[in-house]
Image (spheres, grey):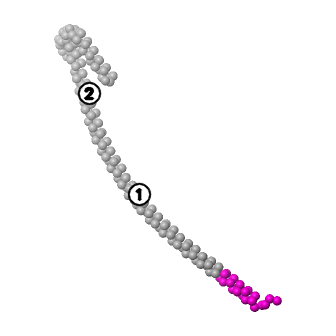
Amino acid sequence: MKVRTFFLLFVLVAITAFAALNWSAFMTQTTLSLGVAHVQASLGLVMLGMLAFLVALFLVFVVYLQTSVLFDTRRNARELQASRELADQAEASRFTELREFMKIELIKQADRDGESRAAVLARLDQLERDLRSRVEQSENTISAYIGELDDRLERAAQGRTVQPPA
């Protein structure tokens, strides 16, 4: 129990005990002035009636406050739920947009990869052709050198056989 509630209950019990202990004094008749007229009544009973009226008035006020807070809480909960749903929809929309963006970017990347692969393969083919061409040129050059050396050797061999040794 909260301290505030405990304090209020304590005050009400104390007032009830005080009224019960002094009930004969509360019921004593006296002349009361209402401002425009004088009335014969017991002052204690009138004061207890006013106290009971104030307690009832405060209880109605507390019930009104609790009801208004409850309605506000429910309204805020509905608004919060609507905001949550809107945020969830926006998030789902962003995920969909992100998925589409990623798909498009992956397709672009695949296209770029294909283009760069084709360029690399074309370059490799060109380099291979150049290499083969140079190998052929080297082969032809070496064949020419070997042929020239072979001719020289044949001429040198024929020159030796033609001249007898002296």
Q: Main secondary structure of the magenta part?
A: helix
Looking at this view, is 75 or 27 the one in front?
75
Classify 83 as above or below 26: below
Residue 31 can be seen, yes or no: no
Mark 2 neighbour class, 10 Å CA radius: few under 14, some 14 to 19, many 20 or more: few
- Is 152 contained in the magenta span? yes
Residue at mark 2? 62
Answer with mark 1 or mark 2, whichever residue precedes in sequence: 2
Q: Quadrant of the C terminus?
A: bottom right
Q: Which residues are magenta?
A: 144-166
Residue at mark 1? 102
Mark 1 neighbour class, 10 Å CA radius: few under 14, some 14 to 19, many 20 or more: few
- Which amino acid does the dot numbered 1 rest on? Met
The image quarter in which residue 1 lies? top left
Identify the residue at image location x=26%, y=16%.
13
Identify the residue at image location x=23%, y=27%.
60
Q: Position of residue 11 (x, y in %)?
A: 29, 17
Residue extending furthest toward the front: 165
Looking at this view, is 128 or 81 the one in front?
128
Looking at this view, is 166 or 21 the one in front?
166
Residue extending furthest toward the right: 166
Q: Position of residue 154 (x, y in %)?
A: 70, 86
Q: Position of residue 103 (x, y in %)?
A: 39, 59
